[in-house]
Image (cartoon, rainbow, N blue to C red):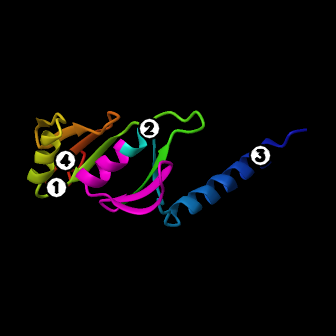
Amino acid sequence: MINLTRINELENDHDTALASAVVANPKCFAVAIFTQQYREVRDFYVDILNARITNEKPDRICELELGGVPLCLRACEHGELVSYFHMHLALKHQDSVLGELRRRGIIVTSVGQYNNFRDPEGRVIKLTEERVNVS
């Protein structure tokens, strides 16, 4: 006979352990970006957005730091799909970045307080003067 009370107790114990593990100060060590245009995307983040390379296996994996966020650029090798996301960056003095984007023929649009553009594979990047709280 199945003891449903004991099963519920075990599930509650598991939920409590999981909640404790999550609250125990998790750290993000990387946000993976899978790409089919490794060199172009790497150079875009390094040359235009001033991402700092922390480790690299050329043409395969590049660990970057951008605005305090660890990124891991990875070449699609084993059937992975290209990663898509919207990245929001706060940048006080945007003129030089926006000028370089336009010089390279990258379309920049302004909507409200955001200057929007795309990386070589179409990921949206939004620049604003300061962090915007979502409410």
Q: At numbered mark 3, what does the secondary structure look like: helix, strand or loop?
A: helix
Q: Residues within 10 Å of mark 2 (few under 14, many from 20)?
A: some
Label 2 vs label 3: CA separation? 39 Å
Q: Name the residue under label 3.
A: 7
Q: Which residue is drawn at 57% across and 57% down?
A: 19
Q: At numbered mark 4, what does the secondary structure look like: helix, strand or loop?
A: strand
Which disc number belongs to residue 127? Answer: 4
Label 4 vs label 3: CA separation? 50 Å
**Type of amino acid under label 2:** Ser
Residue range (magenta): 40-68
Label 4 vs label 1: CA separation? 9 Å
Q: Which of the 4 image quarters holds residue 20? A: bottom right
Q: How crowded is mark 4: few (under 14 residues within 10 Å), some or many (20 or more)?
A: many
Q: Residue at x 30, y 54 (%)?
A: 46
Which disc number belongs to residue 130? Answer: 1
Left or right of residue 30: residue 85:
left
Q: At numbered mark 2, what does the secondary structure look like: helix, strand or loop?
A: loop
Q: Which of marks 2 and 3 is nearer the N terminus?
A: 3
Q: At numbered mark 1, what does the secondary structure look like: helix, strand or loop?
A: loop
Closer mark to the observer between disc 4 and disc 3: 4
